[in-house]
Image (cartoon, coloured by chain):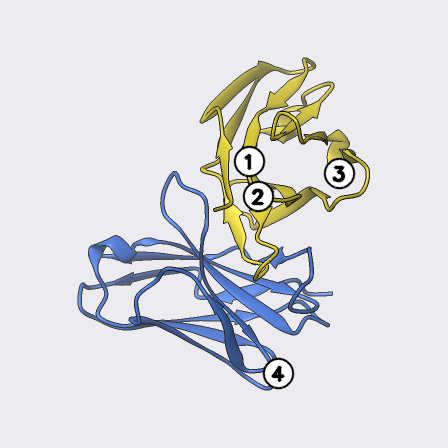
Chain colours: A blue, B yellow
Amino acid sequence: DAGVTQSPTHLIKTRGQQVTLRCSPKSGHDTVSWYQQALGQGPQFIFQYYEEEERQRGNFPDRFSGHQFPNYSSELNVNALLLGDSALYLCASSQRLASYEQYFGPGTRLTVT
Amino acid sequence: AQSVTQLDSHVSVSEGTPVLLRCNYSSSYSPSLFWYVQHPNKGLQLLLKYTSAATLVKGINGFEAEFKKSETSFHLTKPSAHMSDAAEYFCVVRLDSNYQLIWGAGTKLIIKP
């Protein structure tokens, strides 16, 4: 049973560019959450998707947007990249919106130069 | 507002000795609390969770944590450290209002041979 998968593993972008990160949830899971983890810090909640809608959002600007597809996979888009967007981006899936347990993918390391 | 504070950024112990990772939380009511572990280049993994049941919670790999409401603490312990325990550990509180996870800054556990 495949767990949560994310692609790509690493990404290097230039300031001002746009990036799309992808996530496939664990089999049987319908809820996807995205987190940003800066170096030396804990993850920060970006947003959560359930039934193809954004259900919750953390304190992130509108440059961060997302999408969930009918097969429950999800994308995170970041526009107008800033140097401060360099981080590990984590995707987590759960079986339902209020589930206590989230399963995390290995993350995508984004470097903005 | 709910928050979580991990009192040590780094903890170093010798293999075979006890481990104590400290976490304090602030919450206006009984919280849901978690410990996650992050090994290098691997995804976050749930160690254990407290959800208003038994105050002493047993997790995977021999870890356990005790919820102490009077001290607003949820410290993680293990009787005997193993080299494979070297990782970053995160204490997390879940907001009951919207199920968002609030993460501590993390404690890096170093195991000396």
Label 2 or label 3, whichever comes before in sequence order: 2
Q: In this view of the protein, which residue sits in the foreground, B43 or A38?
A: A38
Quote the CA–CA distance across marks 1 and 4.
37 Å
Is residue B33 in view?
A: yes
Task: Tell whether label 2 touches label 1 (CB within 8 Å).
Answer: no
* Residue type for callout 4: Asn
**Which residue in the structure is indicated by mark 2?**
B28
**Which residue in the structure is indicated by mark 3?**
B60
* Residue type for callout 1: Tyr
Quote the CA–CA distance across marks 4 and 2.
38 Å
Viewer-nearest of labels 1 and 4? 1
Q: Which SS class for mark 2?
A: loop
Where residue A22 sits: x, y (%)? 47, 71
Residues marked 1 and 2, same chain? yes
Whether A99 is drawn above or below B52: the answer is below
Is residue B38 in view?
A: no
How many callouts does the rendering have? 4
